Image (cartoon, grey):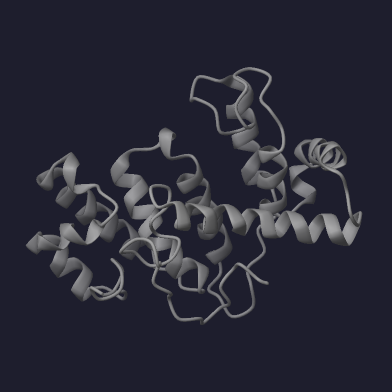
Amino acid sequence: MTVRPAVGDPLRPCPACPCWAYAGAPACPHCAALVDALVEEGWREHVTASFGDLSPGEQRDVARMVADEPHRHDWRVFDAALDRLACSGCGARLGLGPLDCAPCEVAHGNRYAAIETDRPGVPPGNEHAVRVNVSVVRRPHLTSPQELLARRLLLPLLLVGELPSTAEAQHFSTALKAAAARAGASALTRDPSILLTDPALTAVVAAGPYPHLFGPAPR
């Protein structure tokens, strides 16, 4: 079963939170599992095609090889490899430790040397945008709540092949962060649609290319 949506697929509501599927991560366990599954799907395909069935220990051996050669592997394969390795500095999954952990920061920086191949039918740069937003959502402790919210809301659209222009994305992000600041920290909950009570943000979303960005109609 393919986890990743196909280009042109409709957005799917999450059965466990008010957002589109994937957009509730990391707070929504269902959405967080979907985001992790994107990475795991790439790993399974790589291991099956290259090695067949491997034990967990053998998979860790492969993960060490992949971690040393990010430029030779798809970004999902590289991220999944790091997930299988413990950091020598902090003990967390490699690349997911605190900002002051040097080995994790080196591993995280290496993520962007991995291969990002746009799928047929998407605007150039879509895969890079998917890759960045997945990285932010899976490392929520290393970004601001406002930036995390903007990234996770856009992720479902990116996965089905959309790509806002740089100007559109910056305009939305600026409006969203301003609305969140006016509403206070309590507004950054699992249901971000409450921010649409802010007239300025509502106007930006309504005038933009993705008026249903905040999720499906109430159900």
Asked whether 125 or 14 is in front, the reply is 14
Asked whether 135 or 91 is in front, the reply is 91
Look at 18% across and 48% down and name the residue there: 187
Look at 65% across and 71% down and name the residue there: 2
Which x, y percent locates residue 94?
A: 64, 31
Picture quarter with the N terminus: bottom right
- When the figure is inspected, residue 70 is found, relative to residue 75, above or below; the finding is above
Indicate the quadrant where residue 191 lies: bottom left
Which x, y percent locates residue 6?
A: 58, 77
Which x, y percent locates residue 174?
A: 24, 52
Q: How many marks?
A: 0
For residue 207, side relative to residue 57 (left or right): left
Asked whether 146 or 208 is in front, the reply is 146
- When the figure is inspected, residue 10 is found, relative to residue 213, above or below; the finding is below
Which x, y percent locates residue 202?
A: 15, 66
Indicate the quadrant where residue 169 lies: bottom left
Picture quarter with the C terminus: bottom left
Indicate the quadrant where residue 11 lies: bottom left
For residue 175, side relative to residue 84 (left or right): left
Look at 65% across and 33% down and name the residue there: 107
- When the figure is inspected, residue 21 is found, relative to residue 121, above or below; the finding is above
- When the figure is inspected, residue 5 is found, relative to residue 44, above or below; the finding is below
For residue 172, side relative to residue 33 (left or right): left
Asked whether 23 or 130 is in front, the reply is 23
